[in-house]
Image (spheres, rainbow, N blue to C red):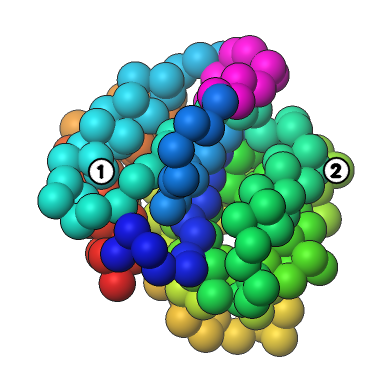
Amino acid sequence: MKNRNSFLIFALLLNGLSPALSWAQIDAPIDRYVYFLRGGPFDWHSSHYHRMETEIEGLIQGSGMEVRFQSAHNTQSAFLCSRIFNDVRDHGLAQLSLNRVILVGHSWGSSAATGLIRCLERRGVVISLLVSLDLIPRPGDIRPDEIPESVSQIFNFYQDVDPVLKGVQALHRPSGLETNIVNELTPMPSANPVDAHNRMVTRLLELGRIQILIRDELLR
């Protein structure tokens, strides 16, 4: 699989503090790039990112894939769009529609993901999987619950326990249809209502839902 002309971007848009990007030097050919975008003003989910990275690496161990994980802040999604496109172009991939791109977002990060998808769509990059975790629309974002047709498969997880931060329950296409979209309520047993919005990520990781979705797409 190492020699396949495919390209993965796994953009995990979760909460974080620093807006700085840190791009490592690439000394050897990389088959897949995993971009982790932290979505909010506080670094609540850095441990989730590290857990996810570690567990995904374990799940794909032995596959022959070379995966590089990177971290960024969701406010730099416009810059990231250019960065992703340039990475794809620099790898000499003629058909961007064949690139395997995965986006995962939580809260404002999910909201930012829609804008990133539209930016990539204009540049010919198709998204194979979007995993949205309790999407909360960011101020100024336009129709973040309307997912372009350039995304092949969408999983939208939400909770209805937090009295203030309740995620969008139904993502849809521009046509209004829910084609290839799964909108799923995440059970939150014994959750503190005021922390359910953030605890939902932990719950899904405990259930293995996020890791398996990404593993299956990586190895498809």
- Residue type at the position of mark 2: Gly
Q: Nearer the viewer, residue 207 or 67?
A: 67
Q: CA distance from mark 2 to mark 1?
A: 33 Å
Count the marks: 2
Q: Report the magenta residues as a range.
A: 14-24
Q: Earlier in the sequence, mark 2 or mark 1?
A: 1
Image height of 131 relative to 21, above or below: below
Quarter of the figure that contains the N terminus: bottom left
Question: Is disc 2 placed on a helix, strand or loop?
Answer: loop
Nearer-the-camera pick, 77 or 65: 65
Residue type for callout 1:
Ile
Number of the label disc, if any, that sits on residue 140: 2
**What label sits on residue 56 in the rendered view?**
1
Q: Give the SS element for disc 1.
A: helix
- Kindly identify the residue that appears in the image at 50 percent across and 60 percent down: 7
- Image quadrant of residue 93? bottom right
Please identify, in this view, whether the residue under mark 2 or under mark 1 is nearer the observer. 1
Q: Position of residue 9 (x, y in %)?
A: 51, 51
Can I make out residue 213 in this image?
A: no
Query: Is 217 situated above or below 164?
Result: below
Q: Residues within 10 Å of mark 1 (few under 14, many from 20)?
A: some
